[in-house]
């Protein structure tokens, strides 16, 4: 039973990404949307946490539309992060057995 | 697959109602069934027909209403949240001695039971909020 977690807050504003990663099982997927997409950038204070999560097998995604809306399309993103669009977001909700939205 | 979408914020407080709209459209485009969209807390502000944003701004209420008309969506507004924020249909307006009705086309006022029923009947409940 895999879970898709969505996180929508910047990791520099709230600790929802940290809380989410701390309870994620190895087969979980995490999708960064809205302000949480800033966590996908290379070299931030949460990059190590994301790297540790993906090393464990957790898959981390970021919503491309929200990255573009914040002018971050040209910025280098972490190699561990896969970009998806809204149809990819929908697909992730169907491929996992449950959805947990961290608000 | 059957989805229920919960929207907890209004169009001018947070991105969440825009995200919910985009997600709903993508789910419909992928051939999924939207069982219900439930507007809760400040999310009920998506349902006011009295909102008049500038012409070059997106109008989420109209976007939701058009999407509902096009795809016959069940869009429910939580009654207690709606009463607090002045979102009234004809019945609620009369019952509470008010003079106006501002619920937009495609939205219906109902109770929290509809959210629970949506969660039970759907394969996925996806929540958008602050």
Image (cartoon, rainbow, N blue to C red):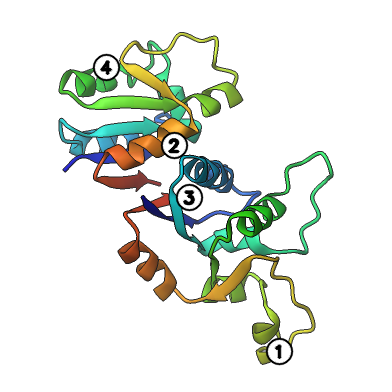
| SS category of the residue bearing label 1 | helix
Q: Report whether mark 3 lies on the same chain as mark 2.
A: no
The reply to whether residue A11 is in sight is yes
Q: Position of residue A26 (x, y in %)?
A: 15, 30
Q: CA distance from mark 1 to mark 4?
A: 58 Å
Q: CA distance from mark 4 to mark 3?
A: 27 Å
| SS category of the residue bearing label 4 | helix
Q: Nearer the viewer, mark 1 or mark 4?
A: 1
Q: Which mark is residue A9?
A: 2
Q: Residues within 10 Å of mark 4 (few under 14, many from 20)?
A: few
The numbered mark 2 sits on a residue in which chain?
A
Rendered residue at 42%/35% (across/down): A89
The residue tagged 3 is B129
Q: Position of residue A70 (x, y in %)?
A: 58, 24
Q: Which mark is residue B94?
A: 1
Q: In the picture provided, is B103 more to the left or to the right than B55?
A: left
Which of marks 2 and 4 precedes in the sequence? 2
């Amino acid at each position: 039973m895999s879970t898709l977690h969505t996180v929508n807050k910047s990791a520099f504003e709230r600790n929802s990404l940290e809380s989410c990663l701390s309870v994620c099982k190895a087969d979980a997927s995490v999708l960064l949307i809205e302000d949480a997409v800033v966590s996908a950038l290379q070299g931030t204070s949460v990059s190590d946490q994301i790297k540790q999560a993906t090393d464990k097998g957790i898959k981390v995604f970021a919503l491309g539309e929200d990255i573009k809306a914040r002018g971050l399309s040209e910025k280098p993103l972490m190699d561990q992060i896969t970009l998806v669009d809204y149809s990819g977001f929908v697909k992730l909700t169907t491929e996992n057995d449950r959805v947990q939205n961290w608000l | 697959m059957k989805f229920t979408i919960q929207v907890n914020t209004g169009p001018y407080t947070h991105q969440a109602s825009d995200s919910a709209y985009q997600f709903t459209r993508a789910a419909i485009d992928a051939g999924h069934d939207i069982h219900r969209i439930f507007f809760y807390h400040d999310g009920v502000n998506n349902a006011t027909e009295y909102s008049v944003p500038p012409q070059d701004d997106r109008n989420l209420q109209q976007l939701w209403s058009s999407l509902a008309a096009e795809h016959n969506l069940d869009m429910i507004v939580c009654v207690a949240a709606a009463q607090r924020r002045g979102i009234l249909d004809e019945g609620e307006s009369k019952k509470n001695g008010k003079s106006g009705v501002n619920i937009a086309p495609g939205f219906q006022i109902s109770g929290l039971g509809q959210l629970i029923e949506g969660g039970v009947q759907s394969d996925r409940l996806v929540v958008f909020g602050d």
